[in-house]
Amino acid sequence: MKNSFKLAVIFVLSMMLAGCKKEQNAPSYHKGDLTIFTDESFQSVTEALAGGYMINYPETHIKVETKKEDLGLLDLLKGNAKVIVMSRNLNPDEIKTYEERTDLKFLPAKFAADAVVFVVPKDSPKESISMEEIEKGLMSDKKELIFDGTNSSNLNFVAEKFKKQPKDLQFSIIPGNQKIIEELGKYPNKIGVIGLNTFSRPYDKTSEKLREMVKVLPVVEKGKSYNADFKGLSSMEYPFTRVLYFLINEGNFNIANGFIRFSCTHLGQKIVQKEGLQPYNIYKREVQMR
């Protein structure tokens, strides 16, 4: 009888311990670690959203690592990343590979409208740039356009805009968006091509300093001039407006999915707005009083 009682107690305790262990290992969106891979062009907004998430969920730790856009996608497909930030569209073969490798449907989580912008030194006489000039520059041996590197989001997006492969384009390289701005004065006849989020934060001292060093050129298309401001981004009229989105390799509701849900909520979208970008999920609402 005593032995039966002991066995019953041991059984109950073992079940309780197993339950506790299972609970500890269960997926959770509010505690644990996550690394997000992002192109340097979107680093600021990604870090801001990660910071907001960690404030709301103090037991989470999110690390943001910069990696060229295409390389981040490869890491996601290989299972070496849970979340990446993308701007260019995936082609049908890439979407098929994504769905086969992750066993997930291709559902990009869009969270912000950003832009590729064309900059010149403040004292440059140039006041605008046309789509024809950009396309001609991309095919010129003079390599007048300066990008932040191969496999970068800026180069990918511009190439996609003109329906060309990056490898077929002519361009100069200065590694890093910020370095392009800082060193552009050495090359008065060249034009820097950078991500707007590099210096879009309205009240950030570094952003203010970078904005003072260059002039952002309006883009002229079919005789009309467009700016990469809130109006140009919200209407998508600025020709190089791009939508940023998250891709994941996580089937359950863990930190990756929790972070994406947060980024697309009202709070996350306010963070995007404070970064000087156009929130993707916030639209102006008109209320009529009667």
Image: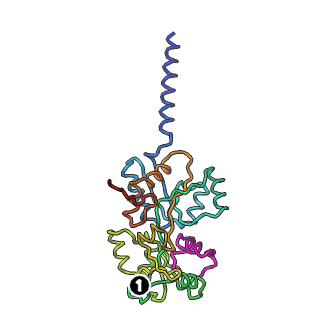
- With respect to residue 2, does 276 lie above or below? below
- Within 10 Å of disc 1 (Cα), the crowding (few <14, some 14-19, many 20+) is many
- With respect to residue 98, does 70 lie above or below? below
Give left or right: position of 84 versus 121: right
Relative image position of residue 202 (x, y in whole percent): 34, 69
Residue found at x 36% / y 52%: 55
Q: Which residue is mark 1?
A: 121
Q: Secondary structure at mark 1?
A: strand
Which residue type does callout 1 highlight?
Pro
* Total numbered labels placed on residues in the image: 1
Give the magenta range. Answer: 146-173
Q: Nearer the viewer, residue 174 or 226?
A: 226
Q: Nearer the viewer, residue 41 or 125?
A: 125
Residue found at x 45% / y 69%: 233
Magenta highlight on residue 11: no
Relative image position of residue 192 (x, y in whole percent): 48, 80
Give left or right: position of 249 versus 199: right
Relative image position of residue 45 (x, y in whole percent): 42, 63
**Picture quadrant where residue 126 is located:** bottom left
